[in-house]
Amino acid sequence: MLKLRHRTDADWAPRVLAGLPELLVEQAHLEKKAASTALGFLFRYPEHLVLQAPLSELAREELEHFEATLALLQARGIRFGRQRPGPYAGRLLRIARPADPERLLDQMLCCAVIEARSCERMKALATALRGVDEVLADFYFDLVVSEARHHGLYVRLAKEIFDPDLVQARLDEVLDHEGEVMREATGMARLHD
């Protein structure tokens, strides 16, 4: 796992679980957005063949997670609909430089950090749910494995396109920035607030 600069507070999981319906609706939206982001790379950067098959596979997996989350919502009688996104991703992506090739690198590293933060928080949720709601605990523990793989994939692919030392240096900057973003968290009942 990436070494996140800011650890999620221990009281975060119990607090957001109080707003479980909103959290699960957000989960569905996040899975759909992750699939869309992976596909966006495929369309914007067809010249980088190294991205094509791995991100196509990642997009399919994210859509499977979206469908699984929709099924959970339906089983629990929670209506899926529009939801105002939390500000986390927008604040994180402010570090992305506006022109390629730097933009590609920065966006890939932001994706890696988002996946790492998701991994950390989903593990906290799964742990808090153990003994309370085994179906959701198992759901989140399964997602933790995927999120860990996904953040590693984005970093690995970045290092295949760019100089690995440059990638690592920029990743450290993105991680520092994400730590600052986390200190500005809104306290919403969200995975990414």
Image (cartoon, rainbow, N blue to C red):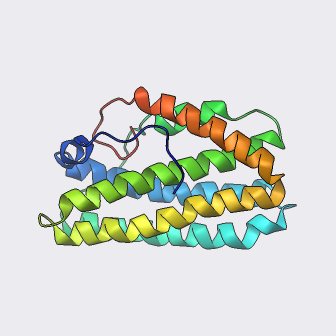
Question: Residue, x 20% and y 42% (percent of image)?
Answer: 15
Q: Is residue 106 visible?
A: no
Whether residue 94 is visible: yes
Please tell me whether residue 122 is drawn above or below residue 177 in the rendered image. Answer: below
The residue lying furthest to the right in this view is 47
Residue at image position (28%, 72%) is: 138
Quarter of the figure with the C terminus: top left
User: Front-most of 178 and 88?
Assistant: 178
**Residue in view at x 57 percent, y 39 percent:** 175
Left or right side of 140 for 35: right
187 sits left or right of 95 in the view: left
Quadrant for residue 93, please give it.
top right
Residue 75 figure quarter: bottom left
Where residue 140 sits in the image (x, y, percent)? Answer: 32, 65
| Relative vertical location of residue 144 with respect to residue 26 in this rendering, above or below | below
Please give left or right for residue 128 compared with residue 183 in the image: left
The location of residue 72, given as percent across then percent down, is 27, 68
